[in-house]
Image (tube, rainbow, N blue to C red):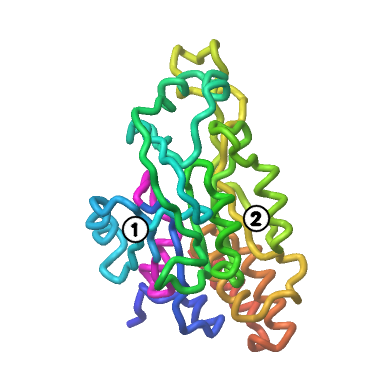
Amino acid sequence: MSDPSRSPLADLLGFTGRMEIADIGAADITEPAPYKVLLDKGLGRLNAFEADPRHHPKLRETFGADIALFSEIVGDGSDQTLHMADPESGMTSLLKPSARSLAFFNGFSHFGKIFGTEPVTTTRLDDVAGLPDIDYLKMDIQGAEMQVLAGGTDRLARCGVIQLEVSFVPLYENQPTFADIDGWMRAQGYLPHCFTQVKRWSIDPIRRNNNVRMPFNQLLEADIVYVKDPVFLERWDPELLRRIALIAHHCYRSPDLTGHLIRHLEDQGDLRKGALDAYVALANQP
């Protein structure tokens, strides 16, 4: 009897190791983590960043005892100020909210209200003790994503997939925009693959059905997935492509990207002949 927890794709790819996954802002579990399927199938190990130890038991309960927990506040390595908002709002940040941007949207002047500040020392991702090199990164840290990326170029040198939040209308002072992050990611060899969520919000003072959470058309922010540029596959080694293929298939339901990678690996002799046909049959199974 076959083990339902195994990944036939991992067998097809000849992948026998475990990917190192990092989640920065891991305690904000508002929906199932895209990487959990990799943990469940034994294909990855989670390195979770959460500065508040009160959240650690819940993270272990959700992701298993094998999780590696880090309490560092990841940033650029400097002393900074943490701006504390209501926990329900999710807007606590190293960056100060922009009163003018908040006022542009219905309800955000309330959501972004700061109740206190706290001095903190941040740590560059490259300087976190005990953290392995990362294959797959997810983060949502309210505007400080660029600090993490710029301070983690060594640990992320072989990172195949990065999911992060980008803003179209920055809600914080000096927050990088989608264009800033996109330009930086492309310069590091990544290409946008998909949006997993696009958030819109209504502009003050007009409200839909008198509900501030019901949007019209204005873009606010989005979760976007970047992958090492699949147009130029010759730049990347076969092991990196195997990891991207597994993440694309299991986490983002992107069989076209996975098939593209498998065809390249087969053409280069890194997979057996017929691997693409075998994957097409696998992907078409109900």
Residue at 54% across, 72% down: 282
Q: Is residue 91 magenta?
A: no
Q: Quadrant of residue 149?
A: bottom right
Give the residues in magenta: 27-46
Cβ atoms at labels 2 and 1 below 8 Å apart: no
Quarter of the image for the N terminus: give it: bottom left
Disc 2 packing (10 Å; few <14; some 14–19; many ≥20):
many
Q: Which mark is residue 286?
A: none
The amino acid type of the residue labelled 2 equals His
Place of residue 15 in the rendered image (x, y in percent of width and height, measured from the top left)? 51, 82
* Left-right relation of 55 to 109: left
The amino acid type of the residue labelled 1 equals Ser
Q: Secondary structure at mark 1?
A: loop
The residue that disc 2 covers is 193
Residue at 59% across, 74% down: 279
Place of residue 96 in the rendered image (x, y in percent of width and height, measured from the top left)? 49, 33
Q: Which mark is residue 71?
A: 1
Q: Secondary structure at mark 2?
A: strand
**Does 151 sit above or below residue 241?**
above
Nearest to N terminus: mark 2 or mark 1: 1
**Does 3 sit above or below residue 103?**
below
Residue at 54% across, 33% down: 172
Place of residue 25 in the rendered image (x, y in percent of width and height, measured from the top left)? 41, 51
